[in-house]
Amino acid sequence: MTDPTTTDPTTNAPITTSSSHVSPADIALVISDVDGTLVTSDKRLTAATRAAVRDLGEAGIGFTIASSRPPIGLKPLAAELGLTLPMGAFNGSTLVAPDLTILSETLIPAQAAREAARQLAQARLDIWVFADGRWNLTDPHAPYTDLERRTLQTEPNVVADLEPLLDRAAKIVGVGSDATHLEACEAAVASALHGRADVHRSQAYYLDVTPPGAGKAGFVDALSRRLGIDRSRIATFGDAGNDVPMFARSGFSVAMGNAAPAVQAAARAVTAANDADGFAKAVAEFILRR
């Protein structure tokens, strides 16, 4: 449970944290989700966010990102923020260097991928398959394809049939504009694929299917091992259900003001929304506070 400590002077929204003391000196690494967290709703990095990342570096605190995006969608952020640490693509199941060298990769088991595609098609959702380093789909004019083009800064690979790609899929996405329907689909697909794949909505309109047990929680563990940093010294930021597992694996967690109540309840602290520089405000208030 959280107790209010600060009010956002811009929006009057509360910035809250748990009552237990958090020492900024204890945090050695910050891992942030991207969409809905680090960038604004129109996919921009604000000046305040860029400055917050620089401030972390000057304080000797590492910074990296974990996102449902494919590696290509992380490249512009790595360049703009000057990232040097491994990044987590496909909800953390693929570790990638800032130059997009693949450090490790986990794929969805083929049978689970086929069942996921069947379930998503049955739910009348558009289907995207991320495989062979590409964003693959059958209809380049379907809803949200233009948004994804802007987000990833790349074009999709249009194919006649997605079936041959399911043996080597890193992520499968069901896309739909009806948020209520997608929420129901999340529960149904998660039940059907229980133990065989992870199923989470990364946005209100995207239902992601990724390799089982290799999500953002696994990314926290991987970075902890690679960098020799205890998980208790890692802080995580996020806004969606797929961020909750990494909250549980880190020493300190921050949910965005735009996150659903259940996501906020799972975090140690709640900051302002992504469109109100919530990331930068939380870094200043919770991580760099002296």
Image: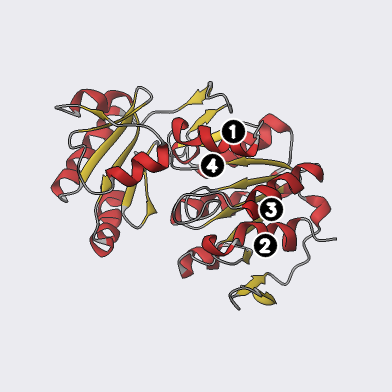
Q: CA distance from mark 3 to mark 2?
A: 19 Å
Q: Position of residue 139 (x, y in %)?
A: 18, 37
| Amino acid type at image mark 1 | Ala
The quarter of the picture where residue 109 lies is top left
Which of the marked residues, 2 or 4, is nearer the chain's N terminus?
A: 4
Q: Are marks 3 and 2 in contact (CB under 8 Å)?
A: no
User: Gap between marks 3 and 1, in whole Å?
Assistant: 28 Å
From the viewer's perspective, is the residue at label 1 or at label 2 nearer? Answer: 1
State the residue position of label 3: 251
Return the x and y of residue 131 as percentages of the image width and height. 33, 26
Name the residue tied to disc 2: 281
Identify the residue position indicated by label 4 in the image: 66
Question: N-terminal of the two: label 3 or label 2?
Answer: 3
Q: Is residue 101 above or below residue 193?
A: above
Q: Which residue is mark 1?
A: 79
- Whole-angstrom CA distance, mark 1 to mark 2, is 22 Å
Real-space CA distance between mark 4 and mark 1, rounded to the nearest whole angstrom: 15 Å
Q: Quadrant of residue 205?
A: bottom left
Which sits earlier in the primary sequence, circle 1 or circle 2?
Answer: 1
| Mark 4 burial class by Cα count in 10 Å: few <14, some 14-19, many 20+ | many
The quadrant of the image that shows the C terminus is bottom right
Q: CA distance from mark 3 to mark 4?
A: 16 Å
Separation (CA) of disc 2 from disc 4: 20 Å
